Image (cartoon, grey):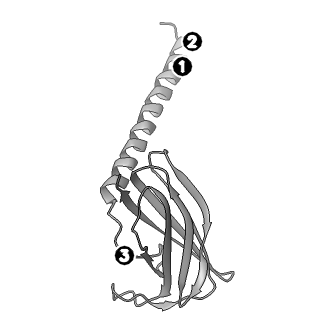
Amino acid sequence: MSVARLPRFTGLALSLCLALTLGACDSDSQDLEASRAEVFEDGVAKDTEGGAFRVMLFSREGLEVGDNSLIAHVGFHDPHDPTDPGVGIPDADVLLDAYMPSGAGFVGDLEGRYLGDGRYEITGLELSEPGIWRLELSIAVGATIDESVHFVFSVPE
């Protein structure tokens, strides 16, 4: 093999290795999401990534294939008490995006409608098929606080 062909061959080989590695990472991230998935239960709670809020989710029917609605309670909470829902946050901007890590389904830009006492109703959550769904909530209060939290659920058939 000539010296001139070696860099081209090396570049092709490196490109192939990179593509295979990235494909494996995507598969690994899907597996990781699946291992974190839980069945939806009323009152499931998580703190936002920055820790400013605790978000609790409620639904009359749970999560299922088809049209769903959620109530998200957003509150300032005691971070040392995992059962404390916190004092409700009024008039926040609450947005929900939901997608399947596999790429098969997506619902975006659903706005929460303020109900009072830190509760926001989110309607129009149309889950197209069963499987693993990641729900990402963005919460903005005023011009200075912008937090997010995600939940991973297994939606049954």
Residues tagged 1 and 2 counted as in contact (Cβ below 8 A): yes
Look at 64% across and 85% down and name the residue there.
Answer: 91
Checking the image for residue 144, the label placed there is none
Residue 52 in view here: no
Question: What residue is pinned by disc 1?
Answer: 7
- Binning the other alpha carbons within 10 Å of mark 2 as few (below 14), some (14 to 19) or many (20 upward) gives few
Residue 134 in view here: yes
Question: What residue is pinned by disc 3?
Answer: 42
Determine the residue located farthest toward the right in the rendered image.
143
- Binning the other alpha carbons within 10 Å of mark 3 as few (below 14), some (14 to 19) or many (20 upward) gives some
Query: Foreground mark, 3 or 2?
Result: 3
Look at 43% across and 76% down and name the residue there.
Answer: 58
The image shows residue 139 at horizontal and vertical percentages of: 58, 75
Measure the C-alpha gap from mark 1 to mark 2.
Answer: 7 Å
The image shows residue 144 at horizontal and vertical percentages of: 65, 81
Q: Earlier in the sequence, mark 1 or mark 3?
A: 1
| Closer to the camera in the image, 80 or 96 | 96
- Binning the other alpha carbons within 10 Å of mark 1 as few (below 14), some (14 to 19) or many (20 upward) gives few
Total label count?
3
Measure the C-alpha gap from mark 3 to mark 2.
Answer: 65 Å
Question: What residue is pinned by disc 2?
Answer: 4
Task: Name the kind of residue labelled 1 in the image.
Answer: Pro
| Closer to the camera in the image, 2 or 82 | 82
Residues tagged 3 and 2 counted as in contact (Cβ below 8 A): no
The image shows residue 157 at horizontal and vertical percentages of: 35, 52
